Amino acid sequence: MRTPAQNAELALLLEVAGTPKPGNVDRQHDLPGLRFEHFLAGAVGAQNGLRMALDSDVGIGEAFERAIEGMADQSGGNTQFGALLVLIPLVRATVEHDLTRAGVRAVVEETTVEDATAFYRAFDHVDVRAGEPPEELDDLDVRRGSDAVPAVRERGVTLGELMEESADHDGVAREWATGFERTFEAADEIVRRKGSVPDRAAATFLYLLSREPDQHVAKKHGKGTARSVMVRAQEAREGGPELVEAFSESLLRSGINPGTTADLTAGGLYIALERDGIEL
Amino acid sequence: MRTPAQNAELALLLEVAGTPKPGNVDRQHDLPGLRFEHFLAGAVGAQNGLRMALDSDVGIGEAFERAIEGMADQSGGNTQFGALLVLIPLVRATVEHDLTRAGVRAVVEETTVEDATAFYRAFDHVDVRAGEPPEELDDLDVRRGSDAVPAVRERGVTLGELMEESADHDGVAREWATGFERTFEAADEIVRRKGSVPDRAAATFLYLLSREPDQHVAKKHGKGTARSVMVRAQEAREGGPELVEAFSESLLRSGINPGTTADLTAGGLYIALERDGIEL
C-alpha cells in the first residue's frame, strides 16, 4: 500500500532507528548538534523530492535536489545526503524499469547533463564546505555547489559519468558505478536475518562495516583510520553485543561516523521493503 | 517549507521519539508486539490521508479513514488512531480557517453525516473489537465499524455531534467538543519549555498526565486506575528523572498505556511546529 517514495522515506526512518550503529546517530545515540530528531525531520522533508522521483518526466537530478532542499530544513545539517543519493535512483528504477541491479544501471545510464547540474545545486542546500577550501578548487569540485554548473555544462558530463569518476574515493558514487552492488548485498542481508527490522538493519550495518573501509571515514580521517574501523568492526561482531556497544561509544567519542555504510544500509532497507515486502 | 500534512506526520514521529513517556512506546521503550518501528510505519502510512486533509473538497471523515487505513499497514496494530483523530481537524483548520481554537471549532461544526460514516468505516481497519463485545451492541457502538453506517445515516448525526456525545468518556472526543482545549494547552507547554523538541514533548506528556486522568486508561482499567496514574505522574514529576523512569517501567510492566495523553501531545507538537514554527 505504501508507494515507493513512502518506502524510501520509511527506509530512512528505519535506518536511524536501528541501534547500535557504531559511530552514527541512532535511536539510542545522539551527537552534539546532530540528534535523532534531525533525522526524523530530514526524512519527512525529503518526501517531496522522493515523490518527484516517481514521475518519469522529472529528472532524477532535480528530484534529488528537491529531496536535499527539504531534508536540510532542520538545524542538524547534512543528515541524509548520501542515503538520498542511493535512494533516488532506486525509486526511479522501481517505477521506470524494475528494482534490480540491471534496472538501476539503466537509470544511471539514462542520466543527463541537467541531472549533473541539479546534483551540484543540491550542495548549495547543505554545508559540505566545512573548513577552508583549497585555493585552487577543481572546476568540478562539489564544494563549488551551483558555481560549478557552467563547467558541468561546458564539459557535457552526465550525472552517471560524474559518479563514475568519483567511484574510487566515494562509496556512494561506487554504488552508482557498480549497479549498486553493496546496496543489494545489504538488502539480502536484511532479508535473510531474523528479528525486528531495525535490529536487522543494525546487524547489516555492522556486517558491511566489517567488510570494507567506510569511504566517508576515509575522506575525513584517512584510509588508515577507515581500515582500523573495519578491523574493529570485525572484532566487535565476533565479541558480541557488549563489545559492539563499547565500539559504538568509542567511535562516537572520537567523532568517527561511518556515514557511507549507513547510506548503503538505508538503500538496503528500501529494497527489502519494496522488492521483498519484509513486514514490520 | 513543510506542508501542514508533513508537519502532522513529523508530529507523530516526534511524539514517539520523546522519552520517557510513562507507559507508552517511545524511542527507548518497546512493548511486546508493539514496537517503535510500528509507529514509524504508522506515521508514514498516514501520509496520504493527512494530505487529503489539505484539500477542502475532501471530507475530513474520508481523510481520516484514509489515514487510518495507511497507518494500519504494519503488524503492531492501532498505533496512532487517536492522534490522527486529533491531527486531521487541526490540519483542516490550518488550511481552511486558521490554526486557532475558533478555527478548529469551525471545522468541527462543518462536519457532515458523511464524515460520521467514514469515521465508522475507519474502525474496520483497526482491531478495536478486542475481547468479546456485549451481546446487545448499541446501534452506534464504534465496535460495529462500517456495520453502523445505516444507523448513522438514519439518525442523521454529524461527526461533530457524535464526538459531542462521547465527550464525557473519551478524551479525544472531548477535544473535539471543547475546541481542542488541552491540545492547545499542550502546544503552549511545548513552546515555553527549553531543550530538544522530543524532550519538551516528553515533559509535556508528563505534565498533561499529572493534571487529568487519562481516558484511555480509564476505559481499559477503570477510573480508579486512571486517577492513581495521574497522582503517580504528579509524584514522578516532583521526584525527578529517576522516579519518572521507574514510573514508566512500572506502567509498561502493568500494560497501562496513557494513550489519550500521547494523542494530545502529538496534537500539541503539530501546533507548535505549524503555528509557532518551533525549530528542530
Image (cartoon, coloured by chain):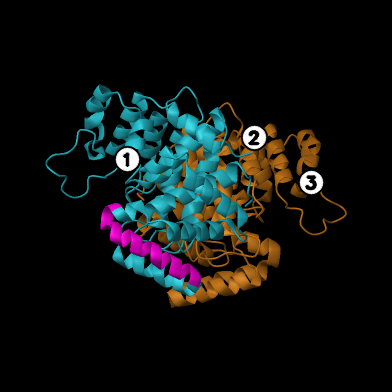
Chain colours: A cyan, B orange
| Near-viewer residue (A127 or B271) | A127
**Residue A122 appears in the figure:** yes
Q: Tell me where residue A211 appears, x and y as whole percent.
A: 44, 58
In the displayed structure, B50 sits above or below B183; it is above
Element class at badge 3? helix
Q: Crowding at label 2, few (<14), some or many (≥20) Cα neighbours within 10 Å?
A: many
Magenta span contains residue B83: no
Q: Chain of mark 2?
A: B
In the displayed structure, B1 sits above or below A249; it is above
Which tag is nearer the camera, tag 3 or tag 1? 1
| Relative horizontal placement of residue B218, taking residue A116 as reference (left or right) | right
Element class at badge 2? helix
> Quarter holding the N terminus of chain A?
top right
Residue occupying image coordinates x 39% and y 29%: A62
Element class at badge 1? helix
Q: Chain of mark 1?
A: A
Q: Which residues are magenta?
A: A219-238
| Near-viewer residue (A215 or B94) | A215
Indicate which disc residue B144 carries.
Answer: 3
Indicate which disc residue A166 carries.
Answer: 1
Q: How many numbered circles are shown? A: 3
> Residue A152 appears in which quarter of the rendering?
top left
| Relative horizontal placement of residue A189, taking residue A264 as reference (left or right) | right
Q: Chain of mark 3?
A: B
Q: The residue under label 3 is which amino acid type?
A: Arg
Indicate which disc residue B266 carries.
Answer: none
Q: Crowding at label 1, few (<14), some or many (≥20) Cα neighbours within 10 Å?
A: some
**Residue B89 appears in the figure:** no
Please tell me whether the stretch drawn in magenta is mainly helix, strand or loop. helix
Indicate which disc residue B62 carries.
Answer: 2
Q: The residue under label 1 is which amino acid type?
A: Ser
